[in-house]
Image (tube, rainbow, N blue to C red):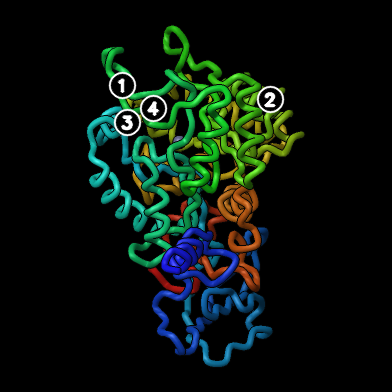
Amino acid sequence: MHKRAAMAVLALVLSMSGSRPSAEGMQGRGGGQPESAWLLKPARVFDGESMHEAWVVLVRGARIEAVGPATNVSAPGATTIDLPGTTILPGLMDAHSHVLLHPYNETPWNDQVAHETLALRIARATVSLKATLDAGFTTIRDLGTEGAGYSDVGLKQAVQLGVIQGPRMLVTTRAIIATGTYGPKGYPAEWEVPQGAEEADGNNLIRVVRDQAGKGADWIKVYGDYRAGPRGETMPTFSQDEMNLIVATAKSIGRPVAVHASTPEGMRRAILAGAETIEHGDGGTPDVFKLMAERNVAFVPTVAAGDATSQYAGWKKGTDAEPAGIRRKRETFKMAMNAGVTIASGSDVGVFTHGDNARELEIMVAYGMKPVDAVKSATSVDAKVMHLETQVGRVATGLFADLIAVEGDPTADISALRKIKLVMKNGQRVK
Ligand SMILES: [Zn+2]
């Protein structure tokens, strides 16, 4: 009986705070008290698709009760929050984060994975989650703990239970790599050095996919290529058969697969296997992007990551000429847009400072995306790609009240996303 009760609690905690009121939604309201209600009055509302001047949003409890022209929304008992000059939009989403990493110019990745204690990494992650939420990012898909085990599952629980403040989280636990292809490297071959992700090959992939899912992974994250070549060149890691096995195993237990891939062949194998998102894609070709569009595979370009690491390597942005890697990134980003690929917003934050997630949107705009499309990418598009579109990602009746207000109009000037006036998650004002 104890065990059954414990299982019920665990099931509640593990369920994404979506399909029913979760601990997060109930936090801050005593039992029996009336639900809080807020009438938000901005200058305009971007609902995830389009802009509406002079609309208001009524929030009751954890959800959006009504949205529309002020004259159409009656709000008995609601407390009005005047937000003149602002735009209300859905809480932003980041489809590629690493809350257990911190910027590589503070500590290189190798040293974080090999030398930092788990407690230090988790303590830092709690601060990073709060910074993410304060920056208006109310949902993240965290793509690998990079050596910090399954601690993303516990962090997600801590947020859901209200122990710490942070965004909604989809997690992947350890992520999967082919044996010998990842890091940290640089140790004698006789040493068994713990790696930044879980090694698996061949039929063992079935066991590892199921094990990670069983331990709490919402998505399966796989490295489809890496710097595995004889001179450290990026080369495909898993064979087509292995990739097919990973995706088929994950799919049959309801876990979509996200594949890190930068080479055309690594991307192609992931697409053919049925991966749902491709991360980075720096070496993508028109053919590969055409295939992605045909198979409805979303692209998470992580433009901010290369921008950050190039600067760590000495590039003086705005003064020096753009390094080759940045020029190529611009080109492949345009190629993907021209091919009509769904572009999801995910920054690889962790490589750079948590809370600076909007950098991805700013750089997508600098690389040629319209600001309105960048904002869509981080709201309604990301929600759909993450299978959360019935819960968040739009300002619509019935959805969870994950909302932000920013000064100005981010669909005209993306830098408005830096001027956060309000952050609400699950109907609770957190900033
Ligand atoms: Zn990453």
How would you rate the neighbour count of disc 4 (Cα within 10 Å): few for under 14, some for 14-19, many for 20 or more? some
Question: In the rendered structure, which amino acid carries the disc numbered 4?
Answer: Ser
The reply to whether residue 18 is visible in this rendering is: yes
Real-space CA distance between mark 1 and mark 2, rounded to the nearest whole angstrom: 37 Å
Q: Quadrant of the N terminus?
A: bottom left
Asked whether the residues under the numbered discs 2 and 3 touch, taking CB atoms below 8 Å apart as contact, a structural biologist would say no
Camera-nearest label, 2 or 4: 2
Q: Residues within 10 Å of mark 2 (few under 14, many from 20)?
A: many
Q: Amino acid at mark 1?
A: Glu
Q: Nearer the viewer, mark 1 or mark 4?
A: 1
Camera-side residue of 28 and 408: 28
Q: CA distance from mark 2 to mark 3?
A: 30 Å
Seen from the viewer's position, the closer of residues 222 and 107 is: 222
Question: In the image, what residue type sits under mark 3?
Answer: Trp
Please name the residue that numbered disc 1 is placed on: 192
Q: Could you tell which of marks 3 and 4 lies nearer the N-terminus?
A: 3
Amino acid type of disc 2? Val
How far across and down, in percent of the image, does residue 322 sit? 44, 24
Instruction: Say which residue label 4 marks.
Output: 310
- In this rendering, the answer to whether 207 lies above or below 214 is above
Disc 2: which residue:
288
Neighbour tally class for label 3: few under 14, some 14-19, many 20 plus, Cα within 10 Å: many
Dot label at residue 140: none
Q: Nearer the viewer, mark 1 or mark 2?
A: 1
Residue 401 on image: x %, y %:
54, 70
Mark found first going from the N terminus, 1 or 3: 3
Q: Under tag 4, what secondary structure?
A: helix
Residue 404 visible: no
Furthest-right residue in this view = 294
Of helix, strand and loop, which one carries label 3?
helix
